[in-house]
Amino acid sequence: MTTPSADKDAAKPSNFLRQIIERDLEQGTYAQRKWSGHPGDAATQHAGVPDPAKIRTRFPPEPNGYLHVGHAKSICLNFGLARDYGGVCHMRFDDTNPEKEEMEYVDGILDAVKWLGFSWDANGTSHLYQASDYFDFMYRAAEYLIEAGLAYVDEQTPEEMRANRGDFSRPGVDSPYRSRSIDDNLQRFREMRDGKLPDGAAVLRAKIDMASPNINLRDPALYRIKHAEHHNTGGKWCIYPMYTYAHPIEDALENITHSFCTLEFEDQRPFYDWLLDRLAEGGLVNAPHPRQYEFARLNLTYVITSKRKLKQLVDQKHVSGWDDPRMPTIVGLRRRGFTPESLQLFAERIGVTKSDSWIDYSSLEAALRDDLDPKAARAMAVLDPVKLVIENWGEVMGGDDVLDPCSAPVHPHDESRGRRTFNFGRELWIERTDYEETPPKGFFRLFPGNKVRMKYGHVIECVGADKDADGNVTQVRAKVVPDTKSGTPGADKVKVKGNITWVGVADGIAAEVRLYDRLFSVPQPDTGEKDFLEELNPESLKVVTAYLEPSLKSAKPDEKFQFERHGYFVADRVDHLKGGSGKSVFNRVTGLKDSWGR
């Protein structure tokens, strides 16, 4: 696994997070810090060596679902900044909620980060951590806060605590348990730890200020009782730390310098600093301690990123699974045909700001096109086929069964990739839309009496079409114009305005092609004004039987192609065809240009 190397000759676009890092590096904010080689308390780190990492960031997902495109931005941001400034990014699981976390999600998250091109290995060390490994220290820190008179056990009901917390116009009311003695609080907290109290009977709260204008400082909860098995610690604990308590401690133990999170955590920053200031005063964590900085989360049109709602889509079979190519999950984007480089490019282009805004989905697709255009091999495909019969083929070529070999570059801008070959014969597949009996103005393809060039092949003249009883075209008829094969002397003697793609009936391969589109039909499907399920796009998936040129027989799973004139497609890596048709399967990644809603 390798971390993408920074292009040292290319200036990275500046943003306020880079400016913060550069200021800290210039001022030597963390220059005297030591690192023991692994997470630890202040004493452990003080016994270490000068930290080889100039900065430390972290990517800290909760393993309660699959990562989505918003997480991809965060991954690129945290790992990318660490890479660019000679630092290290830690991969950490915030696994403090035992009821929602599963190893399936742990494995999926690690795979997603690796696939995006990043590594948590640095300086000979794997920086893969999980919050649950710090439960012992978190408990020790909680007892310290109690002993310092900074925390207490509250046994109000949840309803009483909610009512006594106050609101933005009304200060909170002290809990009747707030004045308990230190000894009583220690005893009661240990009873919580030892399983002597049921779920919900008590919580440990910080003792700060019930009249604070920041409601997050009105004695926030630090620990709750939850008799549940944890995927890492098993049944050792029946009390679990709250996220807002655990997260700053995790950062401190790991020597994180810059803790980047989204704007919804901005109001939590005062508690983040309060907690680490108190623990640093007690000599429990290293100083200077980490600092939290917030940036705007990714709001992408035509997408929802709520894990709960994404799970609802899966559970209710609106999609085929977490990796459905319409899903904004990283596994879904990957199967759709997105590349790691395209997501990194997208993240770099949208940058980071302090203000919320909406990014149009077309920006994501544009980054993908820009990445695929120089990479993807070209191929011809017919997605809505109708047969074209060349009536004079045998007369001109010496037999109806004669096949004329044609070729085209694998990539038009890279001759070193060679050429692909296919056969031109009496019968070809063409797009149904390439024939019009009565052509509209500006239509230069097939209609009676018109000549077109079959791309990489011959010029033909259309003579008409056969129709069924309902008036549907069943077969287009034409004649080949002799001595007009592409690349032969005099081939351009017949001037035509139309140039159409085709696939030979003799060697074309039948394939199942899934034409994926945006899952939702409105730009902001999760505003709450309507049930988001009512905004699903009924045209988000069409499945067609198409014909592809023979070079695609050897397509490998995840291999991307540009189907000429149609867009970018990927060979599906998931086998859904056991016992089915046996056809090759390709997914549409994106069109050649943004045509949504036009």
Image (cartoon, grey):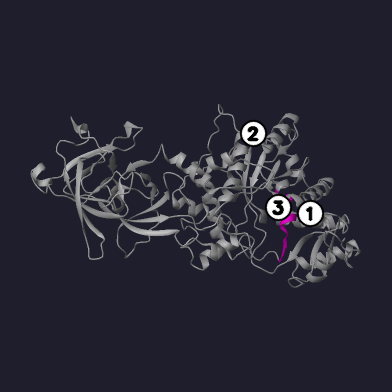
Q: Is disc 3 surrounded by few (<14), some (14 to 19) or many (20+) residues within 10 Å?
A: few
Q: Quick check: 243 left or right of 496?
A: right
- Amino acid at pointer 2: Ser
Q: Report, in whole angstroms, how far the alpha carbon at label 3 lies from the one at label 1.
A: 26 Å
Comparing 298 with 117, the one in front is 298
Which structural element holds mark 3?
helix
- Which residue is labeled 2 in the image? 14
Q: In percent of the image, x 45 and y 58: which residue is there?
A: 540
Residue lying furthest top: 9
- Which label number is shown at residue 264? 3
- Amino acid at pointer 3: Glu
- Amino acid at pointer 1: Ala
Comparing 586 with 580, the one in front is 586
Q: In percent of the image, x 22 and y 54: which residue is there?
A: 387
Q: Which residues are magenta?
A: 238-250
> In this rendering, does residue 50 appear at all?
no
Name the main secondary structure of what is drawn in magenta. Answer: helix
Q: Earlier in the sequence, mark 2 or mark 1?
A: 2
> In this rendering, does residue 249 appear at all?
yes
Which structural element holds mark 2?
loop
- Which residue is labeled 1 in the image? 141
- Counting the numbered discs, the total is 3
